[in-house]
Amino acid sequence: MLLADAHPDAVANSIERLCQERKTDCLAVDAVKLAHHGSKHNTSPALLKKIRSPRYLVSTNGDQFRHPDKECIARVLRLGKPSHLYFNYQSKYTKPWLTDAAQKNFRYKAVVRGAKELTLKVDL
């Protein structure tokens, strides 16, 4: 699920309709690329409660908007309970989520693109 710059209410409502059609409580996907680079304004608790995914991806270097927001990642960890978080850059905004302590505490594995690597591989 690639959320681009989608507004969380619009996506949550669309997922709700799809779930009703499928007679399920939530939408299961292999991976979610967080909206607007991990903005707290684009990733609501209501949206996260409608999605089940083991992998969440954040695409930003943090320079322009200082994303991902810590509130967004905290929501993902609390409500999404992913097994993996993927970051395409290591920055001061992703650094707290790359620590062994955070990974152990929230039971996920952080994956970050290496400084000399051109791509980030996401195993589905």
Image (cartoon, grey):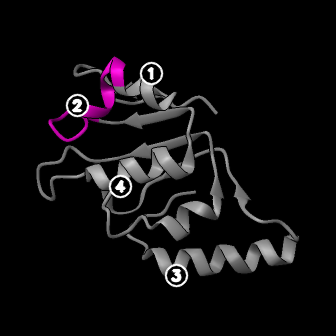
Residue of label 3: 10
Answer whether residue 93 is magenta in the image.
yes
Determine whether, in the image, residue 108 is placed left or right of residue 110.
right
Q: CA distance from mark 2 to mark 1?
A: 15 Å
Other residues around mark 3 within 10 Å, as few (<14) / some (14–19) / many (≥20): few
Which label sits in the foreground, 4 or 3? 4
In the picture, the disc for residue 72 is: 4
CA separation in Å, label 1 and label 4: 19 Å
Residue furthest front as drawn:
105
Q: Label 1 belongs to which residue?
A: 104
Q: Label 2 vs label 3: CA separation?
A: 30 Å
Q: Residue at x 15, y 53 (%)?
A: 66
- The residue type indicated by label 3 comes to Ala
Q: CA distance from mark 3 to mark 1?
A: 33 Å
Toward which corner of the image does residue 83 lie, by quadrant? top right
Q: Earlier in the sequence, mark 2 or mark 3?
A: 3
Looking at the rendered structure, the kind of residue marked 1 is Lys
Q: Secondary structure at mark 2?
A: helix
Spatial CA span between label 2 and label 4: 14 Å
- Point 27% across, 49% down: residue: 70
Q: Is residue 73 above or below residue 104?
A: below
Quarter of the figure that contains the C terminus: top right
Q: Are marks 2 and 4 in contact (CB under 8 Å)?
A: no
Provide the residue span drawn in magenta. Answer: 89-101
**Residue 95: mark in rendering:** 2
Is residue 57 one of those drawn in magenta? no
> Distance between the Cα atoms at labels 4 and 3?
17 Å
Q: Position of residue 35 (x, y in %)?
A: 40, 62
Q: Earlier in the sequence, mark 1 or mark 4?
A: 4
Label 1: state its secondary structure: helix
